[in-house]
Image: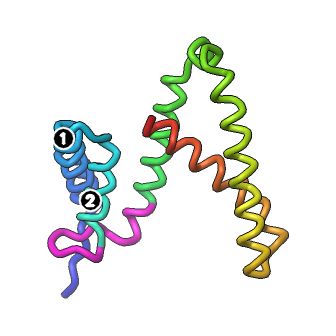
Amino acid sequence: MHHTPSLIATIVAGIGLAFILGTLANRLRISPLVGYLLAGVAVGPYTPGFTADQVLAPQLAEIGVILLMFGVGLHFSLKDLMAIRATVIPGAITQVAASTCLGWALAWLLGASPAGTLFGVALSVASTVVLMRAL
């Protein structure tokens, strides 16, 4: 009989391992985000040992992304942004434009050009949030 881990076991394993590997990454003077990513790989279906519920884990990952974006929003300071606006604003505009164009080009090559612009915009926004959190 196949047994799938419960909600509590999946949450405890994910958070516990993320805490341990995040702390280890921090002590090695690298971003804790690296430890969190490794924790996700460790509880995934392609590694031996504990495997998280394959239906529940993606839903929990979406909640994690929402909380990550909320945390970035909490630390946002308009005063700090205005201090570095000469670098950040042109860089952000260039990054969004380049990601949108690359998404459109990829979709055009695959034959799905109407959705390409939307894909590129979604890619540019997602990568900006991850980049800002890493910085």
Q: Is residue 132 left or right of residue 115?
A: left
- The residue under the point 28% across, 41% down is 30
Residue 62 percent across, percent down from the top left: 48, 54
| Mark 1, residue position | 28
Q: Earlier in the sequence, mark 1 or mark 2?
A: 2
Reply above or below: 74 against 40.
above
Can residue 47 be found in the magenta stretch? Answer: yes
Q: How far apart are the alpha carbons under marks 1 and 2?
A: 27 Å
Residue found at the very far right of the displayed protein? 114
Residue 78 percent across, percent down from the top left: 62, 16
Q: Give the amino acid at mark 2.
A: Thr
Quick one: quadrant of the C terminus? top left
Q: Give the amino acid at mark 1.
A: Leu
Highlighted magenta segment, given as a residue range: 45-58
Tell me the quarter of the picture where residue 113 sits. bottom right
Q: Residues within 10 Å of mark 1 (few under 14, many from 20)?
A: few
| Mark 2, residue position | 10
